[in-house]
Amino acid sequence: MTDADAVADRVSDPPPDDSEVFSVPIDAPQPSQLYLNGLKLSFVTQWFDFANPNYDPLPVRRIGGDWTLTDGHTRAFVASLSGADELRVVRDTDDLPMDVYRACVRWCDEEGVTEIADLAGRVVNHEDFEEKWVERCQAFADR
């Protein structure tokens, strides 16, 4: 059994209603960004209750068969720091530029960022986040 198969066995089927919240193991969702914004991380750690994590569900979408975070990477990372075993998620039904998200997931795979914990060591200051990540994604989208 591969690691992906083991994770898939622990992920329950999502509810049929796209708006319903469900849980996935903390190591199940594939990140769709390579870096975390340190400024944003400092803000999230100010309101996040580490003893009793309670946050809006994080949006996920299936990309390449895996649940992939489309937003909420900072909250997911902080939940991981709190020792959470699962993430509360909801299926993302927004109209997203999926070609950009697929490219982002490919970049993450290429750099070994395949779960939330892999973002450790990838927290950068706000200016570097804009330059290294936001501008890279924007350049891809504008091509």
Image (spheres, rainbow, N blue to C red):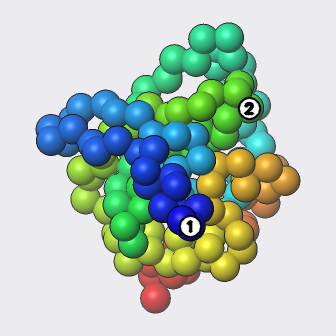
Disc 1: CA contacts within 10 A as few (<14), some (14-19) or many (>=20): few
Q: Nearer the viewer, residue 33 or 21?
A: 21
What is the secondary structure assignment of the residue under circle 1? Answer: loop
Answer left or right for 22 relative to 58: left
Among all residues in the image, which is located at the extreme right?
Answer: 121
**Which residue is under mark 1?**
2
The quarter of the rendered structure image containing the N terminus is: bottom right
Q: SS at mark 2?
A: helix
In the foreground, 6 or 90: 6
| Residue at image mark 2 | 81
Q: Residue at x 27, y 42 (%)?
A: 14
Q: Residue at the spot x=37%, y=67% of the render? A: 65
> In the figure, residue 89 lies in which quadrant?
top left
Q: Nearer the viewer, residue 87 or 105?
A: 87
Q: Judge whether 131 appears above or below 52 on screen.
A: below
Residue 100 picture quarter: bottom left
Q: Is residue 98 left or right of residue 76?
A: left
**Between discs 1 and 2, the one toward the N terminus:** 1
* Any part of residue 78 in sight: no
